Amino acid sequence: MDYYDPKDLKRFSEIGKFGQELMKKFFDYYNAATGENGALTKREKALIALAVAHVKKCPYCIDAYTTQCLETGADPEQMTEAIHVAASMEAGITLIHGIQMHNALEKQGAL
Amino acid sequence: MSQAHALKRKIEAIDRSDEVKYDFYKTLGDKRQELPPLGIDTIQVNITKLCNQSCVHCHVDASPRRTEQMDLDTANRCLEILGEHKEIKNLDITGGAPELNPHFDRLVREAVKLGKRVMVRHNLTVTIDGNPVTGESKSYLPRFYAKNGVEVISSLPYYQEYFTDKQRGKGVFEKSIRAIQLLNAEGYGREGSGLVLNFVYNPVGAFLPAPQEGLEADFKRELLRKHGIVFNNLYTITNMPINRFKQQLKKLGAYDEYMTRLVNAYNPAAAEGVMCRSLVSVGYDGRIYDCDFNQMLDLEITGNGEPMTVFNFDYEGLIKRRIIFASHCFGCTAGSGSSCGGTTA
């Protein structure tokens, strides 16, 4: 059996077993932030969430937000662009740390 | 055999375990809803299962290999019913590709003469492909529609090639665009022309449709920008978990997940507006059903123990009937609802 069982996503609310009040606050906040049109549309929010799901490598979120993207009218081209944004951000974040490497090289008189 | 017993046998024929698991009558009971008929303002006639396409979602299982056709007597009887009943204001002609029935043109012309609003479920590509069996050209259709003031309702799964061809077959998007441009050239979709061109979106997969309003704005913007195309309205329709689409879901192991999504998204307001409350569906052989989906599942309406057909048509009996519901009805009541005219809530 896979470590991540897709059916487990439906059990999310069980996390509230030992702290129901906090989970309620979390779900209210989560639903308000992701599930309603605001300054961003639900589709834009779904595309952001899909990108984050890939960066954080969450299989539950990738499944859920692939569906959410489709059900808010996004298409595979837009979804692919969203994960390219995520991937390029990750690459950029790795590369900008090269400045820290340069700082360290400088300290050692190697630059 | 009693009507209840006959119905039970048919429901079992669909798939008993699915009907137990996804019990529409139980949901109606839980919500204290009954959904009796409100009247009949539309007759939808499915005049052929022949089609130049074989779409993966098609609930009719239409294709170039099908041979079922409504004959002239049955088509004439449909026209008589329209003439006899002023309450029935609309004729909605579907298929297959309805234009491939030899009596199609006559049916349209005569219904227009009766002063009825005539809608045709036009797949667009038949204008380009013609009849897949005889090779007969159908290029006259845009002008024919315009001349008769037909309301054209066409499937276009997306404003891009990828989703459209995935659902309807390779090359369908490009041909559809050409056919729409021909309709636009006749005035369809243009303000002030009075010629109505509506598109139908249904999801390319096991997910629910996006909100109709937002998607319509996307379709209008992108089709105008890329192809110079204009149209009136976009109807979003949920894929019905029957026939070809159900087989596809079962093959993907996604049937139960899809049904659960539909059941969880049950919307009582959408249920109040289901099309079977104001429409009856006529099969190619004249039999009458609550809707095109029930027709494809052979859930026919009976009267005095006999199947009701256009030849023993009983308006009063029909508006007093009990509509036959089954698990697929969750497709019409999920979210914003789904009907041949788009959302219902």
Image (cartoon, grey):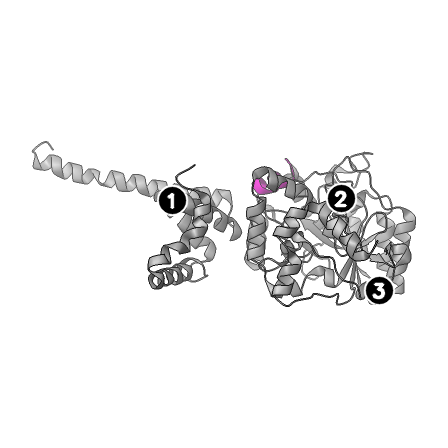
Q: Is residue B140 left or right of residue B311?
A: left
Tag 1: amino acid: Cys
Disc 2 crowd rating (10 Å Cα; few below 14, some 14-19, many 20+) is: many
Q: Residue at the spot x=89%, y=50% of the render?
A: B74
Locate the C terminus of chain B by quadrant: bottom right
| Camera-side mark, 2 or 1 | 1
In depth, the one of B298 and B234 nearer the eye is B298
Q: Position of residue B192 (x, y in %)?
A: 70, 62
Q: Which residues are magenta?
A: B161-170
Image marks 2 and 3: residues in contact by CB distance under 8 Å: no
- Element on which disc 3 rests: helix
Tag 2: amino acid: Gly
Q: Residue at the spot x=89%, y=62% of the render?
A: B83
Magenta residue check for B169: yes
Q: Is residue A104 left or right of residue B54?
A: left
Chain of the residue under the numbered disc 2 shown in the image: B
Q: Residue at the spot x=12%, y=34% of the render?
A: A105
Q: Residue at the spot x=72%, y=41% of the render?
A: B61
Which label belongs to residue A58? 1
Q: Position of residue B71 (x, y in %)?
A: 89, 46
Q: Which residue carries the number 3 mark? A: B317
Chain of the residue under the numbered disc 1 shown in the image: A
The residue furthest top is: A110
